[in-house]
Amino acid sequence: MPRPSNTEERRQQIVDGLLKVMAERGYERASVGEIAKAAGLGPGLVHYHFSGKQEILLTLVGQLASRVRERVETRLAKLKSDDSRARVDAFIDAFLSRGEDAAPEAVASWVTISAEAIRQPEVRAAYEAVVRADLARLESLVADVVGRRRARTIAAGLFAAVQGYFVLSASAPGLVPAGSAAGTVKRMAAGLLDTAEAKEEAS
């Protein structure tokens, strides 16, 4: 595999710097100077590689989306069967489980990004594109269990629970028992899927 260019390395350092600072202090207090310091670079290099803080943020949105999608696909690939319910659980685990690949800084930053999506139209567009794609993926997995008719509602409810756990864990971490999120949402999924299957059989 070819070695990344110096420019790619520097840009990645800067994006990682924003991730670190934003997870600790939020977006507003993530100054270019603080980002540069966290990246181990001078502020001039930040300005050289990015037009501004928002461009770094938009790059981070895309990277966080790619990382969680890799987690989803890795978990789906590890399944030994085509059990549709296990595939829904794998999706939930990819977002909420606390294994070796858990990323608390990414979760905290994602919560901050969702807040910035309310304030900045460009961030809103990027955020919405990510959420739409992730929700569509979950909807397709749910549809494999209960069919298309009820899949959207169930997927939306489960995805809202995932995002809610993100907010709680980032803003009030003591309120969520450690390691409980994935199991709780998977039990919610089981209840919703059981109910939908029962309705399907009754109709």
Image (cartoon, helix red, strand yellow):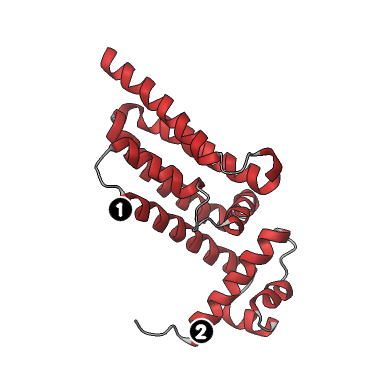
Number of labels in the image equals 2
What residue appears at the point 30 percent right and 47 percent down from the top-left corner?
Answer: 79
Q: Nearer the viewer, residue 7 or 162?
A: 162
> Pointer 2: what residue?
7
Above or below 193: residue 179: below
Label 2 sits on a secondary structure element that is helix
Crowd rating for badge 1 (residues with CA inside 10 Å; few <14, some 14–19, many 20+): few
Residue 151 picture quarter: top left
Mark 2–mark 1 Cα distance, whole angstroms, equals 33 Å
Earlier sequence position, callout 2 versus callout 1: 2
Quadrant position of residue 174: top right
Instruction: Tell me residue 15's x, y (percent).
Output: 58, 70
Q: Give percent across and percent down for residue 177.
A: 63, 39
**Contact (CB < 8 A) between labels 2 and 1?**
no
Mark linked to residue 77:
1
Instruction: Give the amino acid type for the residue marked by disc 1 in the picture.
Output: Ala
**In this picture, residue 115 sits left or right of residue 97:** right
131 displayed left or right of 13:
left
Amino acid found under the numbered disc labelled 2? Thr
Q: Is residue 171 visible?
A: yes
**Residue 38 image label:** none
Q: Is residue 203 visible?
A: no
